[in-house]
């Protein structure tokens, strides 16, 4: 695939190696030369929406917020925003020539809620939890914990301390956030599973056929393992695919129901994932599927 599509699938910010695995070095270099991808540092690339947003934030004395702030902090997201997302002071009038190019909200941020030209790491996660769809909010919270920029305890304490609209949403997301999610793909699949009634946890340990397995998501009570299909997400590496097949087979031997979902299904056709999960739960309820 082209490098821009690859970077988008990887969460909007990524090291070169992961982009190349889905695309190629030549396509990445071409996209950088054309301004379709921005090189942030020696081995870090992002989409230009983040860099454009910084310019608008400076011009308006505002701050990057929500997904734009998440990307600025180096966190992967489900989908980068189409336009830079900003918070501007209530006294600032956004010129018509800029208004069409950004998604802006008015708010007078406290100094502790900002970090340079973006909302602080903690405030970014809280705003995303309050304002974004659950899938996108969970991906941001998971990314923040995965990168070590926040702790689960600190996030939960801040959620309890929140005063104002959206407190219940923020608390729910803080309780779900988990550093073990490998990427937004897995975060999105986990949210779909939770919404479908499964009690899933990332990287649950299963021992089978002499192997120690850690499926992407597992419902230990029901014996259901969910895999975010790495063949599609990480590229066509045959050795990796062989190992995946060995893992899936070992899970089945251990008595688990194993369901595999592609990035396209999870991100672009979530109704298909929900339908599959609902069908499996219905079949288990009827006794048509049994786990050992």
Image (cartoon, rainbow, N blue to C red):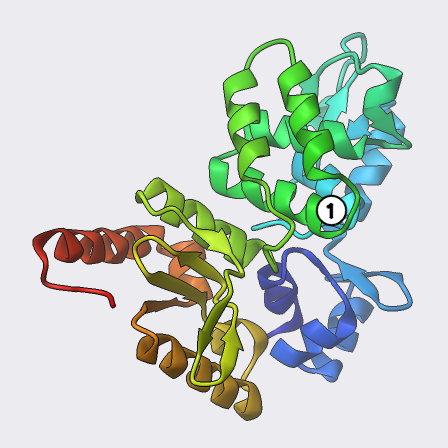
Q: Residue at x 71, y 23 (%)?
A: 96
Image height of 254 relative to 130, above or below: below
Percent of width and height locating residue 234: 58, 75
Front residue of 72/162: it is 162
Q: Is residue 246 left or right of residue 69?
A: left
Q: Is residue 67 left or right of residue 193?
A: right
Q: Residue at x 85, y 68 (%)?
A: 43
Q: Secondary structure at mark 1?
A: helix
Percent of width and height locating residue 126: 66, 27
Front residue of 101/141: it is 141
Task: Note whether residue 2 is visible.
Answer: yes
Percent of width and height locating residue 241: 50, 86
Q: Residue at x 29, y 51 (%)?
A: 274
Residue 84 placement: quadrant = top right
Q: Residue at x 82, y 70 (%)?
A: 33
Q: If the image is split into quadrants, where does the N terminus sit?
A: bottom right
Image height of 279 relative to 119, above or below: below
Residue 150 placement: quadrant = top right
Percent of width and height locating residue 210: 48, 85
Front residue of 235/105: it is 235
Front residue of 276/176: it is 176
Q: Residues within 10 Å of mark 1 (few under 14, many from 20)?
A: many
Residue placed under numbered mark 1 in the picture: 71
Image height of 246 relative to 150, above or below: below
Q: Total marks drawn?
A: 1
Q: If the image is split into quadrants, where does the C terminus sit?
A: bottom left
Image height of 6 relative to 204, above or below: below
Residue 247 placement: quadrant = bottom left
Q: Is residue 281 left or right of residue 234?
A: left
Task: Note whether residue 65 is visible.
Answer: no
């Amino acid at each position: 695939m082209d490098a821009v599509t690859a970077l988008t699938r990887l969460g909007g910010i990524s090291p070169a190696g992961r982009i190349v695995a889905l695309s190629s070095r030549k396509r990445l270099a071409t996209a950088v030369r054309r301004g379709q991808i921005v090189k942030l540092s020696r081995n870090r690339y992002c989409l230009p929406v983040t860099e454009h947003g910084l310019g608008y934030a400076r011009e308006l004395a505002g701050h990057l917020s929500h997904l734009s702030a998440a990307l600025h902090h180096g966190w992967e997201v489900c989908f980068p925003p189409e336009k830079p997302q900003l918070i501007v002071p209530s006294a600032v009038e956004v010129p018509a020539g800029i208004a069409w190019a950004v998604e802006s909200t008015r708010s007078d941020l406290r100094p502790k809620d900002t970090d340079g030209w973006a909302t602080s790491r903690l405030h970014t996660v809280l705003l995303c939890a309050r304002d974004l769809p659950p899938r996108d909010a969970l991906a941001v919270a998971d990314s923040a914990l995965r990168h070590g920029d926040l702790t689960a305890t600190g996030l939960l304490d801040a959620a309890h301390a929140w005063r104002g609209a959206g407190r219940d949403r923020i608390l729910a997301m803080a309780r779900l956030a988990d550093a073990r999610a490998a990427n937004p793909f897995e975060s999105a699949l986990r949210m779909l599973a939770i919404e479908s009634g499964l009690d899933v946890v990332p990287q649950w340990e299963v021992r089978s056929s002499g192997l120690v397995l850690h499926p992407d998501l597992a419902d230990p009570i029901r014996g259901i393992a969910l895999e975010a299909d790495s063949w599609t997400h990480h590229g066509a590496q045959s050795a990796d695919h062989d190992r995946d097949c060995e893992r899936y087979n070992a899970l089945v031997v251990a008595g688990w129901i194993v369901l595999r979902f592609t990035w396209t299904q999870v991100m672009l056709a979530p109704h298909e994932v929900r339908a599959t999960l609902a069908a499996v739960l219905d079949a288990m309820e009827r006794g048509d599927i049994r786990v050992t």
